Image: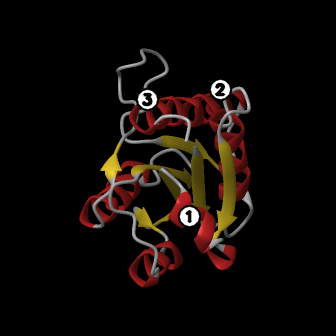
């Protein structure tokens, strides 16, 4: 089982959150996870991945334009993969829900099976995906780790260990 985490990061916050999500997604070592900047995507690993998690900072209530450009220009097909999202924001009220919905819409158009965990796992809820302010306080970091774990569990449930 492989999971790709593709992120855009300006200040390092989104990169740090991607790494936290990756740690949760590794489960007990049965899931291979690669966290990659949009500038350094391993297209072979991404193609072989059963799940992809996209993440970026918010900007004016939307996902970052470099992430959107990457989505628009990638040659890798995401159809049939489990897709999830996370965003970082500079302060509470920074448009995170809108940014996540934008990324979710792009995943849907590309044929991904979108998953967030929602309320199905109970607290803490991840309605659309993980959100942190900057790189997160302790609670937000734990939510991000759990988000990665939940995505990995659902991917394993859907696609098996292979």
Element under label 2?
Answer: helix
Tell me which corner region of the image, top left, top right, bottom left or bottom right, holds residue 38. Answer: bottom right
Judge from the rendering whether residue 42 lies leftward or rightward of residue 50; answer left or right: right
| Sooner in the amino-acid sequence: mark 1 or mark 3 | 1
Judge depth for marks 2 and 1 and give the one in front.
Answer: 1
Residue 160 in sight in this render: yes
Residue pushed farthest top? 122
Q: How many marks?
A: 3
In space, the residues marked 1 and 3 are separated at their CA atoms by 19 Å
Judge depth for marks 2 and 3 and give the one in front.
Answer: 3
Q: Residue at x 44, y 65 (%)?
A: 63
What crowding class fits label 2: few (fewer than 14 Cα within 10 Å), some (14-19), or many (20 or more)?
few
* Residue position marked by numbered label 3 in the rendering: 157
Most foreground residue, 133 or 23: 23
* Residue position marked by numbered label 1 in the rendering: 46
Way the structure is coloured: secondary structure
For the N terminus, the quadrant is: top right
Judge from the rendering whether residue 32 lies leftward or rightward of residue 96; answer left or right: right
Q: Residue at x 35, y 20 (%)?
A: 120
For the C terminus, the quadrant is: top right
In space, the residues marked 2 and 3 are separated at their CA atoms by 27 Å
Please tell me whether residue 8 is drawn above or below residue 21 in the rendered image.
below
Please tell me whether residue 55 is drawn above or below residue 68 in the rendered image.
above
Most foreground residue, 47 or 83: 47
* Residue position marked by numbered label 2 in the rendering: 139
Q: Residue at x 31, y 49 (%)?
A: 113
Element under label 1?
Answer: helix
**Mark 2 and mark 1 residues within 8 Å of each other at the beta carbon:** no
| Sooner in the amino-acid sequence: mark 2 or mark 3 | 2
């Amino acid at each position: 089982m492989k999971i790709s985490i593709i992120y855009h990061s300006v200040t390092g916050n989104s990169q740090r959150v991607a790494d936290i999500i990756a740690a949760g997604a590794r489960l007990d070592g049965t899931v291979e996870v690669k966290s990659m900047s949009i500038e350094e995507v391993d297209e072979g690993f991404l193609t072989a991945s059963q799940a992809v998690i996209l993440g970026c900072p918010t900007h004016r209530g939307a996902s970052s334009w470099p992430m959107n450009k990457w989505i628009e220009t990638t040659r890798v097909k995401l159809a049939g993969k489990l897709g999830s999202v996370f965003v970082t924001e500079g302060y509470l009220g920074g448009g995170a829900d809108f940014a996540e919905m934008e990324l979710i819409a792009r995943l849907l158009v590309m044929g991904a099976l979108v998953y967030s965990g929602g309320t199905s796992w109970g607290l803490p809820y991840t309605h659309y995906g993980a959100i942190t302010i900057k790189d997160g306080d302790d609670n937000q970091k734990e939510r991000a780790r759990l988000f990665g774990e939940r995505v990995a569990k659902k991917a394993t449930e859907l696609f098996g260990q292979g």
